[in-house]
Amino acid sequence: MNKKKSSNVVSKSVQDELEKRGWALSALSAAALALARADSPDLLVKEVCNAIASQGPYLLAWVGKAEDDQEKTITVLGGAGSALAYLENITVSWSENHATGLGPAGMTVRTSGTSVMEDSELDSGFAVWRDLASKFGIRSAIGCPIPDGLGHPFGVLMVYSRLPSAFGPSEKKLFESLAYEIGFGLRSIGRQHKLEDKIHEIELVQQRLTDSLKATIEAMGKTMKWRDPYTAGHQKRVASISTAIAQKLGWSLEKVQSLYMAAMVHDIGKVAVPAEILTKPSQLNSLEMQMVQGHVEAGYQILKDIPFPYPIAEMVYQHHERLDGSGYPLGLKDGQICIEARILAVADTIEAMASHRPYRPGKGLVAAMAEVHAEAGSKLDAEIVGIALDLYNDGKTLHDIIESI
């Protein structure tokens, strides 16, 4: 396989992984809203399953309760999706002595651990449901334990996909987090806490979901290491610089977190740029530079349909715009550029100049700070540049970020 063909294969693999992760992120974001507004167990199950089944290749989602009867039945509490009728003709248990307990739902309840069925046409434990699953187009599934708060599984969250191998490590982590929150939500509703307690619990749920989003965003950023380690390290450093600036501005924790997430994937669109250009050990020609600049549009397309609680796609889309209209891709000016993108622009410029690249050695922080100072008020936001200079002059913050990550 020649170098160009290998690069295309890797790029396709990365894009497939990002697409799978995007579906799971969309499901998690939509389900988080459902969890926050549900005021009854039935509504919680219905809306969470609807949220999952509305995304990408997910044909069916359902929640089951593990019964402590003789047959060890798993009772379906509710579900949603185009393959909902599949549930009308199946029996599921968590007994290891019965064929209906050998699938992912039974395994999940029995072991209190997540069970992934990679391919319905090959999985021996899924044999009893194979023909019916084929009629509904089901190819893979994941079962995640819903805890009862006492260390035992209350039941299981099941999600089915029309694609084989649809649930990798990142998707597994997201759905495990969601199953945990379903259990938390069901228990919260059941106990009927006072209003103050409910508010506190919702805040905890939202924080855990935010943490899951943050962890997944970081995983998306690390994906760039597969093709370009310079970009991966660059994004992490830009995120650190950006959050340091935002904290100096006195932003809320939620707003700082949204900026951090955007910074961690601000160059994710470079998955669409051939690897040989990203790692070229010499100056890029004009055509190659146009291809690199296209990463902004590609990144926006990857992120725009994921319902983040923050405008991350817009932040990424605008981070190469400049106050005088000389930036790209839209040539926005002044107030047309969001404040998060203005911060990213300063942090991006500092890191890009100070750090090494395949085609040149790093110019160092002195040159980087001189550059942003020269462009303050014309291309870059003067207030943000001033804060960056303060972080440089303290002799620690920017130096540590550039040198230690």
Image: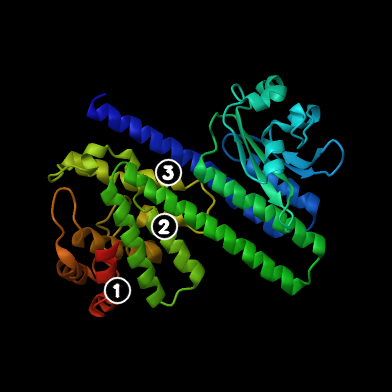
Question: CA gap, disc 3 to disc 2?
Answer: 14 Å
Mark 3 touches mark 1? (CB < 8 Å): no
- Judge from the rendering whether residue 64 lies leftward or rightward of residue 118; answer left or right: right
Between residues 235 and 153, which one lies in front from this camera angle? Answer: 153
The image's mark for residue 217 is none
Mark number displayed over residue 301: 3
Q: Position of residue 181 (x, y in %)?
A: 66, 55
Q: Earlier in the sequence, mark 3 or mark 1?
A: 3
Residue at 31 percent across and 31 percent down: it is: 8
- Residue 369 coordinates in the image, percent (x, y): 20, 70
Which quarter of the rendered picture does the N terminus lie within?
top left
Who's the residue at 48% across and 51% down the image? Answer: 216
> SS class of the residue under badge 3?
helix
Front residue of 378 and 226: 226
Can see residue 23?
Answer: yes
Task: Report the front residue among 106 and 300.
Answer: 106
The residue sitting at the front extreme is: 97
Tell me the residue at 71%/24% (across/down).
129
